[in-house]
Amino acid sequence: MSNYYDILGLSTSAGSLEIKAAFRRLAKLYHPDKNPGGKEHFEKILKAYEVLSDPARKSSYDYRLNYQQSVARQSSQATDTKVWRFDEKEMKRRQYYNEHIKKYAKAAASYETEPEPKKTYNEYKYMLFATPLAVALFLLIMHFATPTGIKQFKSSAALPQAIVKPEPAAPPHTGDSPYSRFFGGAEADSLATAGLTVSNQSGYDVVVCLFGRRHFLRSCFISSGASCEMSHLPEGPWELRYSSGLNFSAGTEEEKLPPGSGFKETPRFYKSSRPLAVKNLVLAEGSTKHFERVTEEEFFEKEQ
């Protein structure tokens, strides 16, 4: 592989301006018009300039040149490594000294190592007798060191019974169905295809109760910012009631709804002013469109 940098008389770090200047200088000397005998060398100069003046070809050429030079350096280093050779006499001499040193090391180790003295039967016998005596002496010292005359009083009063507080009811979650037993049980028809999605954007928790033609269909607790989908409903229109507030407590759903089984803070009750036939309903803050505010008694009024 030709070294184009050597042909142009440049180093491998030469830039484009240096390459161009070197080509012009050599072209004047070896151009066939001025130097008929330099035609072959001029072709080499031209080839080197074509490769090094093109950035893409120069990058590829530099990579191949660096690889070739590194291989050449490795091969030269391999040939410069000195190879040591030993004759038969030298090998026997080294073998003799190795064996001699090993024998000397084993002998020195045997002299330095002292045998561990074995324990006799008398030593074990003394240990067997001394251990129980030491334990008995310790117990005797502890007996005399304990102060006497201290009486222990027993209390006849019964210990107070632990007060067990009933665990608070778990807070409701979106999708729960309060009031369903009170209004007569929820209805779900697997053949019905109607549905209603209620989105709660009122800023309060709500309980939505849905009624069909004078009978209860479904109820749903919806947290603030959440939504609830009620599916498998008969075709509308429906009557919708909802209560809103904070700190909801389901209480017990008996035939007559007891006080306190609703919102503890800011309770409000609403009823649709006309039947609804929609698929999506948004309960927004401050907006009661299509609803009128009613009392708690009117909200829990059962259809006859």
Image: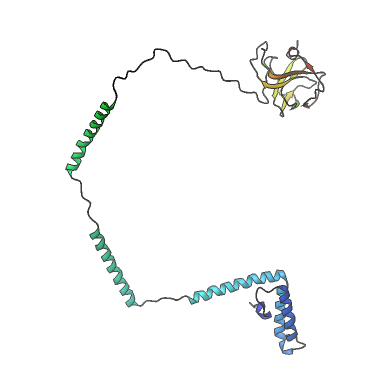
The quarter of the picture where residue 216 lies is top right
Task: State the count of labels.
Answer: 0
Compare residues 132 and 153 and report the one nearer the observer: 153
70 lies above or below 28: above
| Image side of residue 105 versus residue 265, left or right | left
Say if 88 sits above or below 124 in the image: below
Q: Looking at the image, what colour scheme do you see? A: rainbow
Determine whether, in the image, residue 159 is placed left or right of residue 89.
right
Report x, y in % for residue 95.
Answer: 31, 71
- Rendered image quadrant of residue 229: top right
Q: Quadrant of the C terminus?
A: top right
Point 20% across, 41% down: residue: 124
Query: Does residue 208 appear in this view?
Result: no
Q: Is residue 270 left or right of residue 100?
A: right
Q: Based on the displayed image, in which of its 4 quarters is residue 49 positioned?
A: bottom right
Q: Which residue is drawn at the image coordinates 73% and 82% (left, top)? A: 25
Q: Nearer the viewer, residue 104 or 94?
A: 104
Q: Position of residue 284 (x, y in %)?
A: 78, 27
Screen quadrant of the N terminus: bottom right
- In the displayed structure, 109 sits above or below 276; it is below
Counting from the top left corner in percent of width and height, residue 131 is at 23, 36
Which residue is painted at 64% across and 70% down in the image? 63
Residue extending furthest toward the left: 122
